Amino acid sequence: MAGDAWISETAPYLAPREPGRSDAWTEEAARRGRRGGQRLLHAGEVEAPDAVRAAWGLPAGERVVVRRRLILLDDRPVELADSYYPLSVAVGTPLAEPRKVPGGAVTLLKELGYVGADVVEDVSAGLAAEEEREHLGLAEGSAVLRLLRLTRTADGTPMEASLMVMPDGRHLTYRLGKRGS
């Protein structure tokens, strides 16, 4: 997507989907005449990565459920997206299983009683790690953008932390508030 004028809004990715609708990424790509998709690389329990532990105040060694996906645009990798869930939220649900979640994770979370009310996004840049380079087809020494999105319920319960890694040509624009206001 390097060089493309691509303004993406966070709100559609945080809203539960209506039955029969595609995921937010597929719809966003289609609006631009492109084909969006994703491939599930892993789902299950892992030790929480440092960024998630720090954000949620978890002790070292704390386990979480992760869903690791390779995000595709016109069948080419454009993003590596890992979504982490507390065990109390995800164990025993489709989030912890290596299969597609009908309606997407946000829709399932709503069904489980978790609705995002507070979302914080943190953007940083750095060199791609080896695994990131392999998945995204990047050369050694390539830079990437990292977006950490933390979602909590109205009472402050952590429900999802998503870490997205994108090649450095990506341009992030944020729209705050509603259109037309």
Image: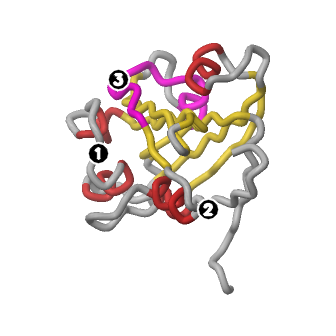
Q: Amino acid at mark 1?
A: Val
Tell me, yes or no, if residue 118 can be seen here: no
Residue 46 x, y percent position in the rendering: 40, 20
* Sequence-first tag of 3 and 2: 2
- Which residue is pictured at 48% across the width and 24% down the height? 48
Residues shaded magenta: 39-57
Whether residue 151 is in magenta: the answer is: no
Q: Which of the two labelled residues, at mark 1 and mark 3, occupies the earlier sequence position? A: 3
Identify which residue, 56 or 100, lies in the foreground: 100
Badge 1 marks a residue whose secondary structure is: loop
Tag 1 residue: 101
Q: Earlier in the sequence, mark 2 or mark 1?
A: 2
User: Do residues under tags 2 and 1 come within 8 Å of each other at their CB atoms?
Assistant: no
Residue position for label 2: 9
**Nearest to viewer (mark 1 / mark 3):** 1
Tag 2: amino acid: Glu
Answer few, some or many: residues within 10 Å of disc 3's Cα (few below 14, many 20 plus, some between 14 and 19). Answer: some
Secondary structure, mark 3, is strand
- The kind of residue tagged 3 is Glu
What element does badge 2 sit on?
loop
**What is the C-alpha distance between the residues marked 3 and 2?**
29 Å
User: What's the distance in space between the residues labelled 2 and 1, CA to CA?
Assistant: 22 Å
**56 within the magenta span:** yes
Q: Is 24 situated left or right of 17 in this image? A: right
Q: Decide: marks 1, 3 in contact (CB < 8 A)? A: no
Residue placed most toward the observer, 74 or 178: 74
Q: In the rendered view of the protein, which quadrant contains the N terminus?
A: top right
Which residue lies at the image location 46% right of the left edge and 16% below the top edge? 61
Q: Which mark is drawn over residue 45?
A: 3
What separation in Å lies between label 1 and label 3 (alpha carbons)?
16 Å
